[in-house]
Amino acid sequence: MNTTRNYIDEDYSPDAVLVLGANSAHHLVRVLRKKEGDEIEIFDGRGASCLAKILSIKPSEVTILVTGKISFSERQGISINLGQALIKPEPFNLSIQKATELGVDLITPLITERSSARLHKESYDKKRQKWQVIAQGACEQCGQNWLPKINNPIALKDWSDELQSRHKIVLYPGAEVKISDIEFKDSVTLAIGPEGDFSSSEIESLVKEDYIPVSMGSRILRAETAVISAISTIRALAGEF
């Protein structure tokens, strides 16, 4: 039987006694029906993980004891930095979840000319915290011990020159280059537009920053589908699948 995994945002050592907060306590007790004495796996989102035992359960907290040897797993595969245009909340949340499951290092929400979702700066931190919880849940489910960093939303023009990757690509229907034409190695920055895609002026600005427009074929994909398809394709072309 698979061991239940739980993210905990703190350093820990063997035999340490830790207290899980209300959200984790609710999920373990009310959803997963865990009891005192049950074993779980904890991970810190930075590569470390170990086994722990539930010592006590209270309505708003669960106390655990670190029982296993702490192990560390290196990041695996090509490094992927995703710039995803803001879209409606539900599909954007799905993008966060699936990009995390597929092991991206960094996710940046992009403000573009055709973004259908508009956020006030005052809500950035609250939104980012929600996205981080979604990523944590995805890591718990898929066995990944590394959480992606999730940035606050940023304008496309301010993001495009921030990251130095071996490959920089932007999905764009009708592009002459197919994504399968590229031999991916080491690292890639991937830009994915909103419904309606990037504008021609945005594509031109990305090209000036050495982004290569690439096509995923003749099908018109939803933004969240494009995220899953593009990241999976990159990993397959890099020989990981």
Image (spheres, helix red, strand yellow):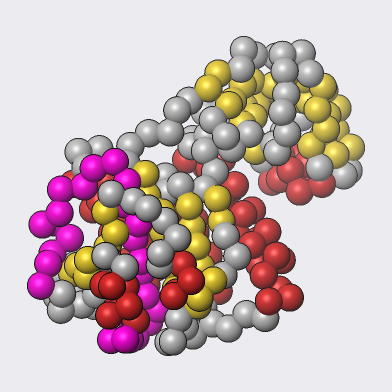
Residue 120, image x and y in percent? Answer: 67, 81
Residue 231, image x and y in percent? Answer: 31, 54
Quadrant (top left/top right/bottom left/bottom right) for the C terminus: top left
Magenta highlight range: 176-201
Q: In this view, does 52 lie to the left or right of 227?
A: right
Front residue (pair 47, 3): 47
Q: Which residue is drawn at 69% across and 36% down?
A: 8
Q: In this view, does 28 lie to the left or right of 100?
A: right
Q: Does the magenta stretch include residue 136?
A: no
Name the image quarter holding residue 174.
Answer: bottom left
Residue 222 visible in the shown view: no
Q: Is residue 197 magenta?
A: yes
Q: Residue at x 49, y 85 (%)?
A: 116
Residue 176, image x and y in percent? Answer: 10, 72
Residue 165, relative to residue 2: is it above or below?
A: below
Q: In this view, does 46 lie to the left or right of 172?
A: right
Residue 109, image x and y in percent? Answer: 51, 68
Q: Residue at x 64, y 14 (%)?
A: 68
Residue 181, relative to residue 48: is it above or below?
A: below
Residue 120 visible in the shown view: yes
